[in-house]
Image: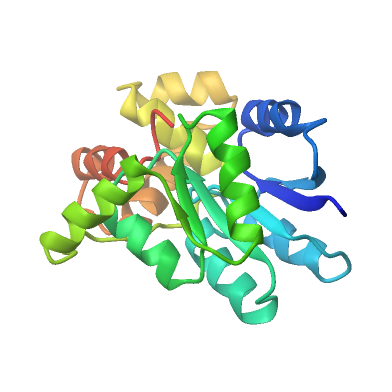
């Protein structure tokens, strides 16, 4: 039996390495490639084939929601499993709507992850009890949660994380070795991208959408 070729897409290098080590050597599973954003995923698929993609939602350049939709349109035989910290039913609904075959939280076990990969490869959908319960609760609430996920650059994510930690503009400037004017420019861009009015709203939305603490 040929091995299931898996691509892992996540912008956290530590997680990429951890998942690779977790699945490396597993019978019938082969890690074909890793990517840090959606554009890297699409670029790889132009020339190479994979069976399953483990995909984070919060990625810079092109997020997981949009990437999943493009993969489903261009490469319908490729199965996508969302692997995220976002435990809101609206995100599960949107990923499934965009063509994902499964959704797991990042606290999932190795055995469950392997089971999910094998399940979706066979053409079935995989939701464990936790994600299924979240989805059902969301559907009962009429799915009113917002699922918009802005695409952030790596630098914007760094600035955002420091804003959430209540660092001042001067402190962010010193820590990231950029000018205070540049920090304020990133802050304005973040406020625009999250469609909020100020830094307080920015922090609230960033936490709601899982951009911090993930």
- Residue 41, image quadrant: bottom right
> Where in the figure is residue 62, as x and y percent of width and height?
57, 60
Residue 91 is left or right of residue 44, and the answer is: left
Q: How is the image coloured?
A: rainbow
144 with respect to 79 (left or right): left
Please name the residue shown 46% across and 34% down the image.
159
Q: How many marks?
A: 0
- Position in image of residue 146 (x %, y %): 24, 61
* Residue at position x 87%, y 53% in the image: 1
* Residue displayed at 51% across by 71% down: 99
- Residue 106 position within the rendered picture, expressed as x and y whole percent measured from the top left: 48, 34
Q: Extreme front residue here?
A: 1
Please identify the residue farthest to the left as the structure is shown.
Answer: 141
Between residue 112 and residue 83, name the one nearer to us. 112
Q: Is residue 57 above or below residue 43?
A: above
Quarter of the figure with residue 17? top right
The answer to whether any part of residue 178 appears in the image is no
Coordinates of residue 138 in the picture (x, y in percent): 19, 56
Q: Is residue 93 above or below residue 86?
A: below
Quadrant location of the C terminus in the rendered image:
top left
Whether residue 132 is visible to the viewer of this picture, yes or no, is yes
- Front residue (pair 112, 46): 112
Q: Toward the viewer: 166 or 122? A: 122
Q: Residue at x 55, y 54 (%)?
A: 81
Name above or below for residue 120 compared with residue 56: below
Please name whichever residue, 179 or 60, is drawn nearer the observer in this view of the structure.
60
């Amino acid at each position: 039996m040929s091995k299931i070729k898996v691509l892992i897409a996540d912008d956290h290098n530590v997680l990429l390495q951890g998942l690779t080590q977790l699945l490396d050597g597993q019978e019938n599973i082969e890690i074909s490639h890793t990517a840090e954003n959606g554009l890297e995923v699409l670029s790889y698929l132009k020339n190479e084939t994979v069976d399953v993609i483990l995909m984070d939602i919060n990625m810079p350049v092109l997020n997981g929601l949009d990437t999943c939709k493009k993969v489903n349109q261009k490469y319908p035989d490729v199965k996508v499993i969302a692997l995220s910290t976002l435990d809101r039913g609206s995100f599960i609904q949107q990923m499934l709507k965009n063509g994902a075959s499964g959704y797991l939280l990042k606290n999932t076990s190795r055995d469950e992850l392997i089971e999910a990969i094998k399940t979706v490869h066979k053409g079935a959908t995989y939701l464990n009890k936790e994600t299924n319960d979240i989805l059902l609760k969301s559907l009962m609430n009429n799915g009113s949660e917002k699922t918009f996920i802005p695409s952030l650059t790596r630098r914007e994510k760094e600035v955002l994380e420091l804003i959430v930690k209540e660092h001042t503009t001067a402190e962010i400037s010193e820590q990231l070795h950029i000018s205070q004017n540049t920090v304020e420019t990133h802050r304005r861009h973040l406020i625009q991208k999250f469609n909020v009015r100020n830094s307080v709203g920015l922090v609230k939305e960033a936490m709601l959408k899982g951009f911090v603490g993930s």
